[in-house]
Amino acid sequence: MTDSSTILGLPKRLFAYVAGVAGVGLPAVVAACVAVALDPPSWGMAARLVPFFALALLADLQPVPMDGAGKSEVSTANVFIVSTAIVFGWRYAVILAAFSVGVTLVVTKRPLDRVVFNTSMYAISGWVAALPVTVLGPVHSGAGRITAYVLVGAVVQLIANVTLVSGAISISAAMPYRRVLLAGMRQSGAAFGIMALLAALTANLWVMRPWLLSLLAGPLFTLVLYQRSAHHSRIAIRDARTDNLTGLGNHRAYQASLREMIEGSDETGAPFSLALLDVDDFKHVNDTYGHPAGDDLLVQLAELLETIEDAEAFRFGGDEFAILFALDEMSSYRCIEQLQRRLARAQTPGGPVTISVGIASYPAHAAGADELQRTADGALYWSKRHGKNRSCLYSPSVVRVYSPEELERATERDARLRAAKNLVRFVDARDPSTASHSEMVSTLAEGIGIELGLDPETLERLRLAGLLHDLGKIGLPDAILRAPRKLTDEEFAIVKRHPEFGHALLDGLGVEPVDRWVFHHHEHFDGSGYPLGLAGEEIPLGARIILVADAFEAITADRPYRKAQSPEAALAELRAHAGTQFDPDVVAALSRHLAASELTVAAFA
């Protein structure tokens, strides 16, 4: 089945363009060959043409790279095409141009469409290079006149060359023609200018004494050698400033670009923004799916970052990225929101990718590079501490900027907090009947908090308290945790110490008031609980919520000493003890939460 949108493997528009260029260039080659056949050169003239053909072919076989990626090249064959056009006329220039590039493309096994297009394009540029001779007549002497002819021919050839090539690139890459044309002129102009001067030197040397052409070997060799050396230098500089995995700029490139943007902003007064971002739970992706999957995720993210307009992206290593926006903070924030929506649709082994982002603007939020990075990092830290998968625009009233020492302490605290969570998982795993107890209590506590209208920061603390409330059980013997009977008074006295153990383990982690909630989560509303016998409003609200969530989950789960009861029975028992053991408002909030979320049957049946 053929693809109706292509012709001979080319998109229809590109095929039409190539056919149009070939429709002009190939007849020009035929016309030149016919003109030579009707008026063949003498043996002497043919011998003089041989060096031009040989040098042009050699130059096309060894093009000079123009960019670090090797996608753009220029051939010094233009030196001999232009000089041939001025010294010998259009027909020999057309044949020489078509011959040198055609043979080169065939030898290097390029596709037929490229052979046809480039041969035709070179033939056209060879013909237009001879316009000064065609319009004003041949020139055989006078260095000034020869040089003027060559320079005019070179300019016309450059315009024809870049114009035709830009059309093909514009169509194939779906880019605006004007943008491609201007880029081509900027990139090729200097090289063509140098070659125009060398073409003038070639023509003058040939007219003076043909053997003087050998003196041109030195300048040509120097030009090629210099260009190749510059090419390798550009590659080395690019590699030194590029992240090997993603192709984005690395930390060195970031620092250089940041300095440049600050200098530009100081001169023009235009603001710019810095966004620092981390991939959420990236370690989990590596640990679960392997490092190749993690690398693929980073490459996918980098490709999305490169598509953001008015921005330059960098990777510092691991899952840490930075984006410099040539925009104010609100425009940058909207770009990040759009990026997060695109990431939500991305397909990865671990599901949707989420990122945490901190954004700060210069000069509104900082007076220098270091301060800008600290404010953006503070905003990033806020995003990560408040649930991840969000972006935070720096505001001094919301985000605290930490000193390096404070950040180090916060990092250490987070590491210890992760260790505490792992210990809780170990506690739950010791008894199969409580395998997911802490996670369920955390979910229930958050649901109760939502029903009570608590703010997002308190809800985050409730989630954490639910996870950590049984941390102190790490110190209890298995014989007590798994006892299939009612505990003795001595055993229960040991169990009653676990809130104190948990509070001690959380001491110094900076998770206030979570540590106090853990300490008091077995206090009863009527004062009959432990460890201090607090009552009513004396008990922190978070502790009252954890107690209700803990009791409900325990009643609806199998235990070694009894079978699980239904959610309805559990709610009935909580209501029966509301006002004595439990806070009535918290029990009512749990009831509303279960009804609203339909967890009564789905999760606890």
Image (spheres, grey):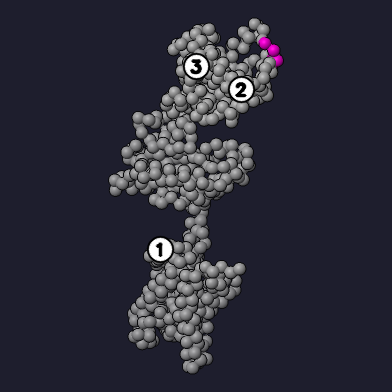
Element class at badge 1: loop
> Residue 484 magenta-drawn?
yes
Identify the residue shown where x is 49% and y is 93%.
38
- The CA distance from mark 2 to mark 1 is 67 Å
Q: Earlier in the sequence, mark 3 or mark 1?
A: 1
**582 sits to left or right of 378:** right
Q: Position of residue 245 (x, y in %)?
A: 55, 48
Sequence-wise, which precedes: disc 2 or disc 3? Answer: 3
Q: Amino acid at mark 3?
A: Arg
**Which residue is disc 2 drawn over?**
566
Find disc 3 in the rendering and name its residue: 544
Q: Is residue 551 magenta?
A: no
Residue shown at 56% from the left, 16% from the top: 573
Residue 546 in sight from this viewpoint: yes
Residue 369 location (% of width, % of height): 38, 39
Please, what secondary structure does the residue beneath circle 3 have?
Answer: helix
Q: Is the magenta region chiefly helix, strand or loop?
A: loop
Residue for point 35% across, 85% down:
135
Between the C-alphas of marks 3 and 1, the distance is: 65 Å
Q: Which residue is mark 1?
A: 176
Alpha carbon distance from label 2 to label 3: 22 Å
The disc placed on residue 537 is none
The image position of residue 339, as x and y in percent, is 45, 45
Disc 2 secondary structure class: loop
